[in-house]
Image: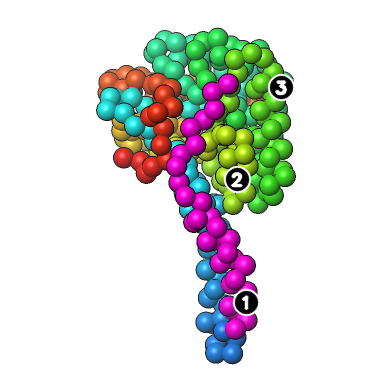
Amino acid sequence: METAPIPNQPAWPRRVILAFVFIAPCLAFYLMRTNILIALAPIFLSHVLLLYPTLVANCQWVGPVMRSFETDKPEVWLTIDDGPSPAHTVAMLDLLDRFDARATFFVIGRRAEQHPHLITEILSRGHEIANHTYSHPSGTFWCAGPRRIGLEIDLCAEQLRAGPDRPARFFRAPVGLKNLFVHPELERRRMALVGWSVRGLDTVRRDPAQVARRILCDTKPGAIIVLHEGHRAAKNPEFHLQCLELTLSGLAEQGYRCVIPRPEQLRAMPPR
């Protein structure tokens, strides 16, 4: 199995943040003799240093996040989250075939367990699968401890290793939220954290044209685009398919190709 390229980024920022979090209460106690507001400042700053990189997707204070890739060609990396989905996966694969596009599917382990034939279909069509946790605990993953984070990664990985030639080099946290424990767990597994540089907010917006327009306006060579599947399957099953079709059509009109980057193209760096 080919492992993910681990971006070179020093671990000292994470260590500095952790050190300050432990030092802040002592500093606050010492400053109590001067002024209560001044004493609270280290506590406030320590909370900011913890919460900002946790709750702001793609923030790299606590570790590298792939947000784009290196290319001098009109290429983008299309990623599709939250599958596999009986309502969407096969139809999305048909759309990708139609536009000669390649994508990486960040799949939820529990859904892969329920629909293993869809994982096989994704791979047989020439696309890639990646780890998006086992149960997608979007409301609690950001505050999970190392044991639970590791379990979510490993349980999903087991489903993606259920057959031959199913590597999962990459990981994306639910809603992009991660804490201080995520990077150490990924480093132990030789996996890399993938974010995005362009998203259409297709889990929030209601108009597929607006979703595609937002993506197309922000796209540049080397962009990582994120779309979703498996949502609104009962009320509006065509929504995510329309988002994908309009996005692929617009990218083709602008001369872009959807590719899966080679390992040497991947770096943790700010979007262009």
User: x, y (%) of residue 185?
Assistant: 63, 42
**19 relative to 246 in the view: left or right:** right
Query: For residue 184, which numbered disc appears in the image?
Result: 2
User: x, y (%) of residue 26?
Assistant: 62, 77
Task: Label 2: state its secondary structure.
Answer: helix
The residues tagged by marks 2 and 3 sit, at their Cα atoms, a distance apart of 26 Å
Q: Label 3 belongs to which residue? A: 113
Say whether residue 15 is magenta.
Answer: yes
Q: Residues within 10 Å of mark 1 (few under 14, many from 20)?
A: some
As drawn, 260 above or below 38: above
Kind of residue at badge 1: Cys
Marks 2/1 in contact by CB < 8 Å: the verdict is no
- Depth check: give the residue in front, 92 or 162: 162
Q: What's the residue at 71%, 22% (across, down)? A: 113
Q: How many labels does the image show?
A: 3
Q: What stretch is highlighted in magenta?
A: 1-30
The residues tagged by marks 2 and 1 sit, at their Cα atoms, a distance apart of 27 Å
As drawn, 179 above or below 238: below
Kind of residue at badge 2: Pro
Instruction: Decide which of tag 2 and tag 1 comes sooner along the chain.
Output: 1
Res. 125 visible in picture: yes
Quadrant of the rendered image containing residue 265: top left
Q: Which of marks 2 and 3 is in front?
A: 2
User: x, y (%) of residue 172?
Assistant: 55, 36
Res. 229 visible in picture: no
Query: For residue 26, which numbered disc appears in the image?
Result: 1
Quadrant of the rendered image containing residue 211: top left
The chief SS type of the magenta part is helix
